Image (cartoon, rainbow, N blue to C red):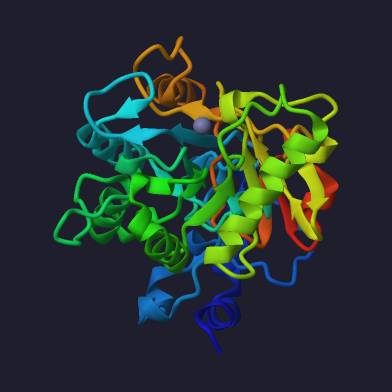
Amino acid sequence: MNNWTKGFRTRPAAWLVILIMLAAIGLCSCTGEDNSEKQPPVTANPPDESPDKNQQKPGPPDYQKLGVNELGQVMILMYHEIGQPEDEWCRTPENFRRDLATLYRKGYRLVSLNDYIDGQIDIPAGTSPVILTFDDGSGGQFRYKEDGTLDPDCAVAILEDFYRQHPDFGLEATFFIYYEHPFRQDEYIQDKLDYLVQKGFEIGNHTYTHQNLRTLSRDEAVHQLARHLERTQSYLPGYQVRSLALPYGAYPEPMDHIISGTEKKLSYYHEAILLVGANPAPSPFSKEFNPAALPRVRASEMYTDGVGLYDWLKIFEENPDLRYISGGDPHSLVIPSTLKERVREEAVIGKKIITYNK
Ligand SMILES: [Zn+2]
């Protein structure tokens, strides 16, 4: 018998009082489609009936207090070079470390792009997902020194170092490389791609030679995208490239051939297509979610026109209702009851929907 049933049977009167109180302050307003897994609120456990607190089953978080909103917006951050000096498309290692520390301190946790598009956002209650993307496969993203050791000032080393010190931050990022020279050390291409995939990082398409897809013919565009996949799979047999970051943010209209296409029996399918600017992306559970046009936030502080990373951190702080805040359970969707109409039904199949009154 666990503490919940034990407490309930031995002290029914006390429980009744507690349940009435909870109902009165609105904490019982959660509605689940499936109530079988419902746990009692942790605050309802009488302390004198809990000899061993470690054996208690944790109850659901206080959604109201945490401001949980899994229909809130998600920042997909866009980085390019990591190096010196700081510039519009270059972040210094020091500033990159500061970005990670700031995100961590403000309650953001890393989620991979693939998990985001799959709606598998598995982070603690009260925290917010953030996605890191690196375009162009520049040298400062992943560099070995002459002695063969990892350069501690490259993005991969900085991410791993931060993760060692803050394992709950996570270690996720997508690298949108192009060829012939990803990461600018040709002798290490195979080694680096193996390393990234083994660590759980993702590789995305950025066209074969960084072409503007708006100006290419249909056939040329298909060739650029299929050739990228072919080359990537020559290093990583069977690797699924699921996303495309548009060089220059430029896309053709119509764009069906850049979402999927086939050349020489090789087929690509980009489940997510990433733009260049300039605002957070919708929740994958929201009706506004459009994976064929996902906006990104520029992770820099120069020429950001008021919509860079630090601008958005401030906007979210001043408008917490806009921000995705996790309920802590990837099998549930937790939202304020007023947002129920905005749920994208096909994205929450198999998930328990929990609403609460704000
Ligand atoms: Zn690029």
Q: In the picture provided, is 303 more to the left or to the right than 27?
A: left
Depth check: give the residue in front, 112 or 39: 112
Residue 91 in percent (x, y) is at: 30, 29
Residue 330, quarter of the rendered image: bottom right
Residue drawn at x 58%, y 56% as measured from the top left = 231
Residue 120 at least partly seen: no
Residue 146, quarter of the rendered image: bottom left
Query: Which quarter of the figure is the N terminus placed in?
Result: bottom right
Please say if 140 is above or below 306: below
Q: In the picture provided, is 342 more to the left or to the right than 314?
A: right
Residue drawn at x 56%, y 38% as measured from the top left = 209
Depth check: give the residue in front, 137 or 7: 137
Count of numbered badges drawn on the protein: 0
Please say if 87 is above or below 124: above
Depth check: give the residue in front, 25 or 12: 25
Please say if 198 is above or below 212: below
Residue 187 at least partly seen: yes
Residue 276, quarter of the rendered image: top right
Query: Which quarter of the figure is the C terminus placed in?
Result: top right
Residue 187 in percent (x, y) is at: 34, 58
Report the residue that reaches farthest toward the left: 147
Q: In the picture provided, is 298 more to the left or to the right than 140?
A: right
Residue 34 in percent (x, y) is at: 78, 65
Residue drawn at x 40%, y 11% as measured from the top left = 303
Residue 324 in percent (x, y) is at: 57, 38
Please say if 210 is above or below 174: above
